[in-house]
Amino acid sequence: MCKTRAVDDLSDARTVQRALTAAHLYYVQDRTMEAIARELDTSRSTVSRLLSQARASGIVDIRIRSPFAAPQLLEEHLAERFGVTAHVVPVPDDANEVDRLERVAVAAAHLLNELVQADMTVGVAWGSTTAAISRRLVPKTVHGTTFVQLNGSGNTHTTGLLYASEILSRFATAYGGSAQQFPVPAFFDDPRTKRAMWRERSTRRILTMQAAMDLVVFSTGSADSRVPSHVYSGGYLEAQELSALDSEGVVGDVATVFFRADGSSDGIALNDRATGPHFDVLRRVPRRVCVVSGVSKVSSLRGALAAGLATDLVVDETVARALSE
C-alpha cells in the first residue's frame, strides 16, 4: 500500500514538472506545440493537456491588459471615483443573469488565487455570489490559512449550516486550509439574546478571528436583485421586516448588516439583531473584495462603496458602466 502511494506521488510530481516545462516553453519561450512535443518526446495532444493542466492548477496565470480596451478605461475611472482597485469583466449586454454571474465568479476566483497567502485569516460571507465563486476556485495549497464564516446562517426554517458550510468547505479544500463555521442564526429574535450570546467564549473565539482578518470576500445583497439574494429569498426576513427596511431607506446588506444609499447603517433596527460584523470591523481588514454582477444590484453596490467597505471590486462591464454614469 505504501509503495503504491509512493509511486503515485512520484508520478504526480513528474506530471506537474512536465506541465511546468511545457508552460515555460510555450508562454515564456514562445515555442510552438509541435516544437514542444518534439522536445518532450510526446504528442501534440499531450502538450495541449499539459498546458490545460498548467492553467487549471495555477502554474499559469493569464492576464489581459490593453490601454485601448473599454474595461481598462472603466477600471481606471472606478479607481479614481471610488478609491478601489477595480476588475471589470467583459460580458455581452445580452447575457442572462446566470451566465453573467458565472463569468464574474470565474474572474473573482482568479483574483483570490493571487490574494490568498499562507497564514491568512480570510472572512467569507455566504450568499449566491460567494457560492458561485467557491465552485470556480483555482486550487492552490497554502500553509496555515483559515476561512471564517462572517455571519450566522440559521432561520426559522433551517439551521443554514449545510449551505454555509459547503461554501466554506470549498474555500478550505481549494487552498488546503481550515474552515471555521459560525453556528448562530442570521438574525436573533431579541437583541438581548445576541448580546448574551456574544459574551459566550465559543462565540468570542469566532469574533476574535473576524477581528484579525487579513482578507474578506463578499457581495452585496439586494431585495431587487434579479438573481435572488439568499438573505431575501431564503426565508430569513418576514414581510413586516422587509417593510421596515424599506421605510428606513435600506438599499442592501453586506453579511446581513443593512445600509442606506449614503452608506450609513446606524439606527436600522434589524442590525441590532443581525450577526454579521459591524462595518468598523470590516473596514479594518486590509483587503476587502466585493464581487457583484447584474445592474439590479447597482444601488446596493453604491451604498457599500459609500460605506467604504471595499478595497477591491470585481464587476461585469454593464455594472461598471452604470457606476460610472
Image (cartoon, rainbow, N blue to C red):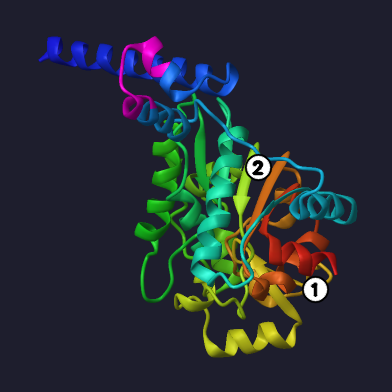
Q: Amino acid at mark 1?
A: Ala
Q: What residue is at 53 percent from the left and 49 percent from the top?
A: 106
Please tell me whether mark 2 sits on a helix, a strand or a loop.
helix
Q: Which is nearer the eye, 260 or 280? A: 260
Q: Which is nearer the eye, 165 or 314? A: 314
Please indicate whether residue 164 sits to the left or right of residue 198 in the image.
left
Label whose residue precedes the other's in the sequence (2 or 1): 2
Residue ID for mark 2 = 211
| Residue 149 seen in the figure | yes
Please tell me whether residue 207 belongs to the stretch shown in magenta: no
Q: Amino acid at mark 2?
A: Ala
Q: Which is nearer the eye, 244 or 137? A: 137
Please indicate whether residue 76 sits to the left or right of residue 109 in the image.
right
Q: Main secondary structure of the magenta part?
A: helix
| Residue 188 seen in the figure | no
Q: Residue 10, how many percent across, how many down?
A: 27, 11
The label shown at residue 261 is: 1
